[in-house]
Amino acid sequence: MWTKVNLLLVLLMIVGTVPVLLRAQEDAEPATQPVSHLCHFEKPLQDPTDSDTDQYCDCDVHNSQPWGLPEVHINCQRHRIGDDFWHGYEQLPQGTIRLDLSRNALTAVPVLVGSGLRYLQLSMNQITTIPDKVFANLSALLELDLSGNRIETIGTDALAGLAMIKLIDLSDNQISTIEVNAFSPLIHLERLVLSNNSLGAFFNRTDSDLYLRLGVTTRLNVLELERCNISDINLASGVGLERALLGHNRLQQLSRLPKQLSYLDLSGTPIRNLPAKFLPNLLHLEKLFLQDMPILYTIDEYALYGLPRLTLLNLQGSRNLSTIHPYVFGQNVVRNETGTALKQLILKGTNIRTLNSSLQMAFENLTLLDIRGAPLRCDCELRWLRDLPNLKVIGSCFKPSALRGKMYGTIDSHQFQCRAEQSWVYIVFNVVLVIVLLVLVAVGIFLIIRAIRPKPHIQMRKVGATSPYARVTIEPNQAEVL
């Protein structure tokens, strides 16, 4: 009897507790799933209701591969979003992996919460500072774009929490100071873009290794520092660096580069000539860009010596470059003691007129030579270039006048002639022409002498004091005596 009563009381207590638990769960749901200010979802993990007239961004739901899980892509470009749009922090919708807030009116970095966000774009705003640990709740972020803002300083803790990030773009800002170890939290960083910032005074003042001072990880693969007004830089500790873009700076020489570089861009730098062993110990360098060098005139002997893997050399737009030394790769190349791997040479827009035949051994693997716009002299000194079997030459001749404007590849080998190698027809023609001219001159002289010589029927008489033809003078007032 007591057992049945006790069981009935327990059942009544459980039934009375269920509504209370349901109400508590309903009250707790808004705290765990807040309403997004960016997207309007009627049902979770389904396409949001997008309308051009509402205040929400363009949100799309995709199925990821290979598991088919829903992913949310949010595009807020040009939505005139300002700092007043946010209320404290913004909890991103579940499954958000991409957020684009570029080209808005933000002056501060918004505090975002999203454990799955991988790609964040904040470019082309008016952001001036990056608060400390503002990205602490975005631990899965892989790419961050802050280009085109007004940021002046990168603090030590500004990028804290971005341990998984691989790409960060800070180009086109006003950065003049980077605090010590500012990049140390980015332990997986592979690409760093700092181009178009006023970092010249900072690097010149510190004169220390970029990696040791700023905490850049040795996993960094690509470094972009173009147009930063840099006159010198130390990258000696970049053991993982493979691509360095250092163009349009005030660099005069480079001696502290990592040995494993495979891609180097020095375009637009004020280098007058490339001296011997200009890039020492870069045994892995494959592509070298020296485009638009304003005062580059010559490439000296041994300038490219010690670059056995160089496959591409681009000198396009270096309009004052007129001389490439015959032994630019070293004399040992000519002696066939070692070879080069050069396959593409771009001389478009330079002032190169000819190439010495001593480069033939270095050009054996060359497949493309672009000389468009260069005042090329197509004479016997370039015949060796025309005879290379696997070479494709793009460009036209400037001299001699008989070949001007003709595409280099359409000219036969025998047409590359110098004056000393003219055929016997031209020699005979010149000899005959000289003889004819001498005959004409002789005939002319003979005719002139004949014209001024007296005619045969004219007699010359001598006139003198005893001659009967002498002049008689009759004086006045004298009469003849009869």
Image (spheres, rainbow, N blue to C red):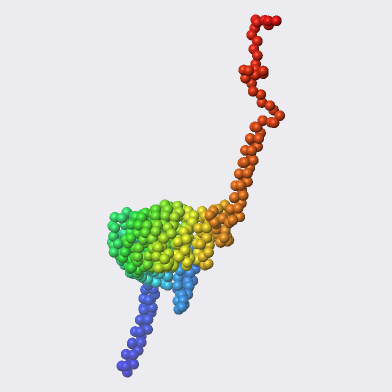
> Residue 124 location, x and y as percent?
42, 58
Closer to the camera, 48 or 76? Answer: 76
In what quadrant of the picture does the N terminus appear? bottom left
Image position of 479 (left or right of 398): right
| Residue 336 sits above or below residue 417 on the image | below
- Which residue is at a point 62% across and 49% down the rendered structure image? 432
> Residue 62 location, x and y as percent?
48, 72
> Residue 84 location, x and y as percent?
39, 59
Closer to the camera, 314 or 307? Answer: 307
Closer to the camera, 398 or 461? Answer: 461
- Which residue is at a point 68% across and 26% down the rendered structure image? 459
Closer to the camera, 474 or 375? Answer: 474
> Residue 288 location, x and y as percent?
42, 62
- Which residue is at a point 46% across and 76% down the rendered structure image? 65
Give the quarter of the image for residue 121.
bottom left
| Residue 6 sits above or below residue 243 on the image | below
Image position of 166 (left or right of 384): left
Q: Is residue 201 visible?
A: yes
In what quadrant of the picture does the C terminus appear? top right
Give the quarter of the image for residue 300.
bottom left
Q: Is residue 181 visible?
A: no
- Which residue is at a point 61% across and 55% down the rendered structure image? 425
| Residue 434 sits above or below residue 96 on the image | above
Image position of 464 (left or right of 91): right
Q: Residue furthest bottom?
A: 1
